[in-house]
Image (cartoon, coloured by chain):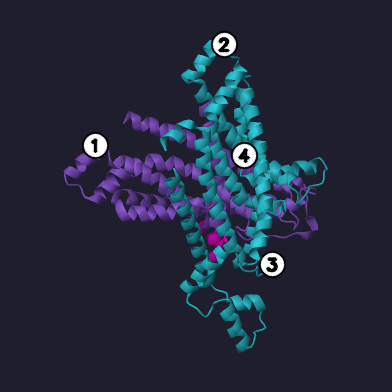
Chain colours: A purple, B cyan
Amino acid sequence: MRGLVAKISLGIIFAEIFLALLANFIAPYPYYRVDLENRLRPPSPTHILGTDPLGRDVFSRLVYALRISFAVAILSLAVALLIGTALGMVSAILGSVTDAVLSWIFDVVYAMPGFFIAIAILLIIGSGVMGTAAAISLTLTPIFFRLSRSAARGVLVKQYVEVAKALGASTLRIALNYVGRELMAVVIPAAVYMLSDAIALEATLGVVGLGVNPPTPSLGNMISEYKDYVFVAPWLVATPIAIIALTIASLNILAKELDKKLNAFLEAA
Amino acid sequence: MWLHILKKLFYVLLVVLTTTAVLYSVARLFPGDPITVLYGETAPSPDIRKLLEARLWLDKPIYAQLLLYWKRLFTGDWGVSIFSGEPVLTLILRRYINSLALALATTITTTALCVLLVYLSTVKGYDKIFTQLATVSTSMPAVLWGIVLMLVLALLKMPIPFGSIVMPLATLTIAGVGIFYTILKNLIEKAFSEPFIEMYRAVGMSRARLFIRALHYAMPVYVTAVLYRLGLIVAGAIATETLFSYPGMGKLLVDAFSSRDYPVLLGWSAMISSTLALLNIFGDLLHMYIDPRIREEK
């Protein structure tokens, strides 16, 4: 039963990534094509998910929105993961002043609500795809920092690391070969969880109208554009919401499964 | 214990100073001349410009500006909003009270609902359904629940009450119940495996009364989690408040951001960072009050 749910989740995520990657082949119409004669049409064979207030094909927009939202989420996640984990490792290995300063900086960032951090970044960079990605990645970085710092500290006191040190292994070697390798088991499942956080944050920013700028579609700004039409055309806003919910739920299930598998693997090894 | 609190208060001060400093530098170092923002494209005469620059301290280096700003922050003069001309402090306080009301109301509804649900699941055995529902509740960010509620109201052909506390309250409760149900249920289950509950059971206490004992045991950790979220709602119901035009701190932030209203943004960050840090201290104190073991340790 559990395995089946996890497989379905994996299938959903793969299907979404497939749609996102092949958006230009799958979308039946360009996402920006306005057709004022056919506004707010309900779903029909020519427009599978109907048309929006400007007569644009909702299915085509949705496919491109998946591409944009996934790109923003994955990009911001990758940046946060690299910076956060690297600094966390450096902090744990070097200790003393470096550790104190880095921990203090990330504590201050972490103490503020994530959304506020995101807005501060948007103030500096300006909204848009890059600004949104930067904003999301900064809100996620402290989490990776804390996670990898505490995990790395745990690894550093292990006996085989002590032995390696005594045998004269360089700090870099210890960082990459021992600490880095053990961190993977902690950071990778966390990254899958965070991917769902990144998607949720993009959606939240989009709903408020701060994220990716229209006419470029993203799951968040589609909701923001269509939410005023709940009385006239409820299906417009229902589809992106359903997709976000499905994505987040699938990612959370996958992360849990991955966590279990990796830990079982590590214990066996 | 007092030393502990004093240390934390110092930390609050540090957080407020850092956040305002960062934001102030951002506001000053990035493009946009404040005087042009204030007076539009019609450039004032050089004399007036000089006067204005002196009034906004633009003739001083940035660290001096920052020190002056900090001085004003502690004397209660937070400047005026560029957008509305209203004093920032009164503007923020008004919005703050609204957000606080929302946060408290949400905490009460969420906690009441959670205790009821956990009671039903651990004592009456409706575990499976509620656990599934909790997963559903946590699989969407809060603001999307707001839109789902809008959809439901639209399908029922009912008007959506914008600007009132009802919609954000309902939204945040739905989004919060999932998280807190899981937390509380795990805590209660842990309590039920403790020897003291076994003892009560052996004495012959009913399951309902055992539940109350377990609840008492679970409270300290639960309260800490709730306080943390309370702060996040005061600050972070940003999207939900904006969606339903509820005049709280969240909407204030989005509005101030859209109009680049730096005095308001600065005041906002000072207010929120100190609130979050103070809530943290309050949490410690409350924890000590509820849990005698910690009181003795300190």
The nearer-to-camera label among 1 and 2 is: 2
As shown in the figure, which amino acid type bears the numbered disc 1? Answer: Gln
Is residue A59 depicted above or below B190 in this figure? below
Q: Nearer the viewer, residue A99 or B244?
A: A99
* Chain letter behind tag 3: B
The nearer-to-camera label among 3 and 1 is: 3
Local secondary structure at mark 3: loop
Which mark identifies residue B176? Answer: 4
Q: Mark 3 or mark 4: name the one nearer the start of the chain.
A: 3
Whole-Å distance between the Cαs marked 3 and 1?
A: 63 Å
Q: Which residues are magenta?
A: A119-134
Q: Residues within 10 Å of mark 3 (few under 14, many from 20)?
A: some
Q: Nearer the viewer, residue B205 or A70?
A: B205
Whole-Å distance between the Cαs marked 2 and 3?
A: 64 Å
As shown in the figure, which amino acid type bears the numbered disc 2? Answer: Gly
| Residue drawn where x is 47% and y is 77% of the image | B61
As shown in the figure, which amino acid type bears the numbered disc 3? Answer: Glu
Q: Which residue is mark 3?
A: B86
| Residue drawn where x is 57% and y is 53% of the image | A115
Query: Marks 2 and 3: CB-CB under 8 Å?
Result: no
The nearer-to-camera label among 4 and 2 is: 2
Q: Is residue B153 left or right of residue A149?
A: right
Q: Nearer the viewer, residue A117 or A215?
A: A117
Whole-Å distance between the Cαs marked 1 and 4?
A: 43 Å
Q: Mark 4 or mark 2: name the one nearer the start of the chain.
A: 4
Q: Nearer the viewer, residue A249 or A233?
A: A249
Q: Which residue is mark 2?
A: B204
Whole-Å distance between the Cαs marked 3 and 4?
A: 34 Å
Which mark identifies residue A159? Answer: 1
Percent x, y for residue B267? 59, 62
Percent x, y for residue A54? 75, 58
Q: Examine the structure image and report whether residue A120 is included in the region drawn in magenta.
A: yes
